[in-house]
Image: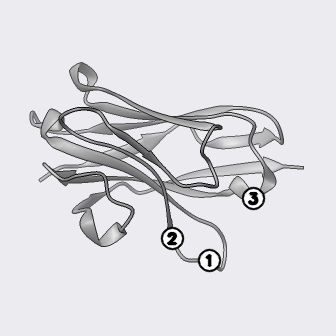
Amino acid sequence: QVQLVESGGGLVQAGGSLRLSCVASGRTFSSYTMGWFRQAPVKEREFVAAITWNRGTRYYADSVKGRFTISRDNAKNTVYLQMNSLKSEDTAIYYCAARMYGVGSESEKSYHYWGQGAQVTVSS
């Protein structure tokens, strides 16, 4: 069982930056591929980024490519999402997710554990 806790959300002006963090419980964090998803009001949850457990290969949604960066620190059981050049359309609840030994996946069904979410609001 893995518990995920996100932090770092908040209110920022368009063009600004935020960094989300997700801390995982347990001793096997390095065995998990980690992902970030988001859900805007009245929209379905969508993939944002993922980083694999073994080689640290990164995957991004086209909408955030070049602006967001996912990274991980296995010593701290933490995955990060650095968000730059934020736009109003990035406003959403951001969720951290984990899947054991998995490849990077854009499907939320591939992930077994989820955090409670962190609100990101970008004002225009």
Residue under the point 21% across and 63% down: 112
Residue under the point 13% across and 40% down: 31
Image-quadrant location for residue 83: top right
Q: Nearest the camera: 86 or 58?
A: 58
74 on left or right of 17 = left
Which residue was labeled with disc 1?
43
**Label 3 vs 2, first from the N-terminus:** 2
Q: Label 3, label 2: how many angstroms apart (C-alpha)?
A: 14 Å
Q: Nearest the camera: 26 or 32?
A: 32
Residue under the point 10% across and 37% down: 28
48 on left or right of 86 = left
Three-letter amino acid code at the position of disc 3: Glu
102 on left or right of 21 = left
Q: Where is residue 75 in the image (x, y as percent from the top left)?
A: 22, 19
Image-quadrant location for residue 85: top right
The tag on residue 45 is: 2
**Label 3 vs 1, first from the N-terminus:** 1
Q: Position of residue 42 (x, y in %)?
A: 65, 80
Label 1 sits on a secondary structure element that is loop
- Give the vertical position of 63 relative to 86 (above or below): below
The coloring applied to the image is one colour
Image-quadrant location for residue 71: top left
Question: Pointer 3 and pointer 1: residues touching (CB < 8 Å)?
Answer: no
Three-letter amino acid code at the position of disc 2: Arg
Q: Where is residue 103 in the image (x, y as percent from the top left)?
A: 23, 52
Label 3 sits on a secondary structure element that is helix
Question: Pointer 1 and pointer 2: residues touching (CB < 8 Å)?
Answer: yes
Label 2 sits on a secondary structure element that is loop
30 on left or right of 22 = left
- Structural crowding at the residue carrying mark 3, measured as other residues with C-alpha within 10 Å and reported as few (<14), some (14–19) or many (≥20): few
Which residue was labeled with disc 3?
89
